[in-house]
Image (cartoon, rainbow, N blue to C red):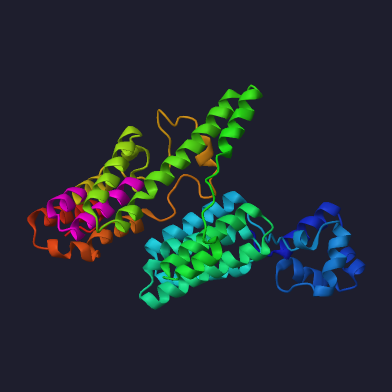
Amino acid sequence: MKEINIAKMLVRKRREKGITQEELAAYIGVSKASVSKWETGQSYPDITFLPQLAAYFNISIDELMSYAPQLTKEEIKKLYHRLSAAFAARPFDDVMGECRRIIKKYYSCFPLLLQMAVLLTNHHMLAEDKKMQEAILKEAVELCIRIRTESKDLWLSRDATSLAAVCYLMLQQPQEVLNLLGESIRPVSTDYGIVAQAYQIMGNVIKAKEVMQIGMYQHLLALIGATPSYLLLNAGNSKVTGEILHRALSVAAVYDLEHLHPNVMAQIYLSAAQVYSLQGNTEKSLDMLQKYAKICTTGFFPFSLHGDSFFDAIEGWFAEFDLGTSPPRNEKVIKESMLQGVLSNPAFAAFAEQPRYKSIIETLKNNLGEKK
């Protein structure tokens, strides 16, 4: 990230122009000592001199001050992952303080604000108490609102709206979700098929294949990703939940989702274990917990988004993501959430003395970092 550094810029531009400090001082109407102090960083030019200096060197005032109110996509990506790692290694309050300083400094860089809102949402649970966690989620919502009202980028505004809705869900404010998204569901877009056909007509088969695969991949994950919520919604009917799980796991097996996207499968196994526990089916619940433990501790890390032999044309698409192919949370934080997803779930409290449950917990602890 670039800082305000008028001293170095003055030195560089003056030397490029081939003039002395005395000549610059005479042009501006100040002493040579003043120019010397500006160039050594001992003092700054009066604000009224900035337009004159910028005009003299034929640059903007922002360039004169070496100030960049916007960050590049690559800078945002690096910043996000640095802060994500910091949440796992440094005191939470210290990292939050740094986040707030960055937000304040780049308050008009809307792509950055969106990723900072994502960062806060993904790490709010690390705050020491529920009240603070809620406050951080509200900060994320405020950033999303600013993006929606101030940014002219329709895609950014759309993503900010979706993220704000997620935060409202976490805050247990369902009416705010409906206020944001509306109470009716629009048809899922199939424009990717039209775009792919356009590329095919143009003779660009490679691009047509990529677009089709991207659309299919997104719809596949949307379908399977909805399974945990739908299972819990039907927890009171064992016949229905059995059918939901059968269909989801059948599709997942066909597309080998345990390898393609293990995280979505981990969520299915955990929610299925919870549902079976609520239904009083201990053995099936432990079966699902066993699958959950296996997928979390076998080949999950290092996690990154990727294709496979079927989705073989989407690697370039992943590489263009705002945060790249890496997960939005540090590995240490992910592992802790995996473990707490079981330990903190009241649905599994009755299993505490079960030998099989103890073995599952031991496997998770030994492989996710909480070793005895």
Residue nearest the viewer, comparing 122 with 59: 122
Q: Position of residue 208 (x, y in %)?
A: 57, 28
Q: Quadrant of the C terminus?
A: bottom left
Q: Position of residue 234 (x, y in %)?
A: 29, 56
Residue nearest the viewer, comparing 196 with 238: 238
Q: Is residue 116 visible?
A: yes
27 left or right, relative to 84:
right
127 left or right, relative to 156:
left
Q: Quadrant of the N terminus?
A: bottom right
Disc count in the image? Answer: 0
- Please determine whether, in this image, residue 13 is positioned above or below residue 6: above
Q: Is residue 99 visible?
A: no
**Residue 274 covered by magenta stretch:** yes
Q: Residue at x 85, y 64 (%)?
A: 53
319 left or right, relative to 223:
right
**Residue 226 covered by magenta stretch:** no
Q: Which residues are magenta?
A: 264-288
